[in-house]
Each structure stands twice: as structure tokens, then as C-alpha cells.
Image (cartoon, rainbow, N blue to C red):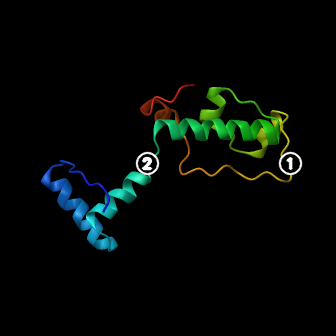
């Protein structure tokens, strides 16, 4: 049996999570595991940022400033205007959610 711990939350929070778990057909513990595993740590976010920047540099010849990375390159026009060229074998780095400046600040991700 796996190690277990107690997490203290207000009764209303526990009741809400228990209802969500019931509706999803899982135990409360399984729901908490699912929710926790979906959240990235600051280190995981930093790894994703580094991998994305590396991929852009290697495959598309782009080096982005922190501001450009935070804002994102939204269209191929942006990429073309920077002189970047996509190779035919470009495959995106998987991303659970886009990294925003607020994410970076909230998780204290270094620039």
C-alpha cells in the first residue's frame, strides 16, 4: 500500500471535491492525484520554456527575447518577419498550457 497523508481543507472544500470525484466515478484520493499531476512545478515550467526555445533555435533559426517568448509568435507573418524558416520536420514541443508572464511570476521561473 502506498504511503498516505492527511490534507486539511475546509469542510466545504472536501465536500465539493467529494462531489466532483463521485461525478467522475473516482475516489477522492484518485481525484486529488489527478488534479496534482496536472499542475506543473516551477522546475517543469522552466524545462518546458528551455525546450521550446531550444527547438525554435535549432529547427527554425529563431532566438527570442523574454518579451517575445511571453507574447508568443502568433502568426507565420511574425516568423517570416524575423527571418526564421520552418523546416519540414518541425514537430511542436508538447505544452499542457501556454506559459504566460503571470505563470512565470507565480512560479518564480527565472528569465
Point out residue 87 in the picture as x, y percentages from the top left corner.
86, 48
Q: Residue at x 61, y 37 (%)?
A: 49
Q: Secondary structure at mark 1?
A: loop
Q: Residue at x 39, y 59 (%)?
A: 34
| Total tally of numbered discs in the picture | 2
Q: Residues within 10 Å of mark 2 (few under 14, many from 20)?
A: few
Which numbered disc, 1 or 2, marks the residue that appears first in the sequence? Answer: 2
Q: Which of the numbered marks, if any, corresponds to residue 74? A: none
Q: Is residue 5 above or below residue 101?
A: below
Q: Residue at x 23, y 67 (%)?
A: 19
Q: Quarter of the image holding residue 62?
A: top right
Answer left or right for 36 relative to 69.
Answer: left
Q: Is residue 58 above or below residue 27?
A: above
Which image quadrant: the C terminus?
top right
Between 7 and 81, the residue placed more toward the observer is 7
Point out residue 83 in the picture as x, y percentages from the top left corner.
85, 34
Q: Residues within 10 Å of mark 1 (few under 14, many from 20)?
A: few
Q: Are marks 1 and 2 in contact (CB under 8 Å)?
A: no
Between 38 and 101, the residue placed more toward the observer is 38
Which residue is most to the front? 1
Point out residue 38 in the picture as x, y percentages from the top left corner.
44, 53
Q: Is residue 29 above or below residue 97?
A: below
Which image quadrant: the N terminus?
bottom left
Answer left or right for 59 relative to 69.
Answer: right
Q: Which residue is mark 2?
A: 39
Q: Secondary structure at mark 2?
A: loop
Q: Nearer the observer, disc 1 or disc 2?
A: 2
Residue at mark 1 to residue at mark 2: CA–CA distance:
32 Å
Q: Residue at x 69, y 36 (%)?
A: 53
Q: Which residue is mark 1?
A: 87
Q: Quarter of the image holding residue 22?
A: bottom left
Point out residue 61 in the picture as x, y percentages from the top left corner.
82, 35
Amino acid at each position: 500500500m502506498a504511503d498516505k497523508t492527511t490534507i486539511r481543507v475546509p469542510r466545504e472544500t472536501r465536500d465539493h471535491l467529494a462531489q466532483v470525484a463521485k461525478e467522475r466515478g473516482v475516489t477522492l484520493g484518485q481525484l486529488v492525484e489527478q488534479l496534482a499531476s496536472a499542475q506543473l512545478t516551477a522546475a517543469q515550467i522552466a524545462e518546458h520554456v528551455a525546450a521550446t526555445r531550444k527547438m525554435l533555435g535549432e529547427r527554425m533559426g529563431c532566438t527570442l527575447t523574454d518579451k517575445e517568448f511571453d507574447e508568443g509568435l502568433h502568426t507565420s507573418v511574425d516568423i517570416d518577419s524575423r527571418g526564421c524558416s520552418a523546416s519540414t520536420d518541425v514537430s511542436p514541443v508538447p505544452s499542457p498550457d501556454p506559459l504566460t508572464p503571470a505563470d512565470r511570476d507565480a512560479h518564480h521561473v527565472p528569465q
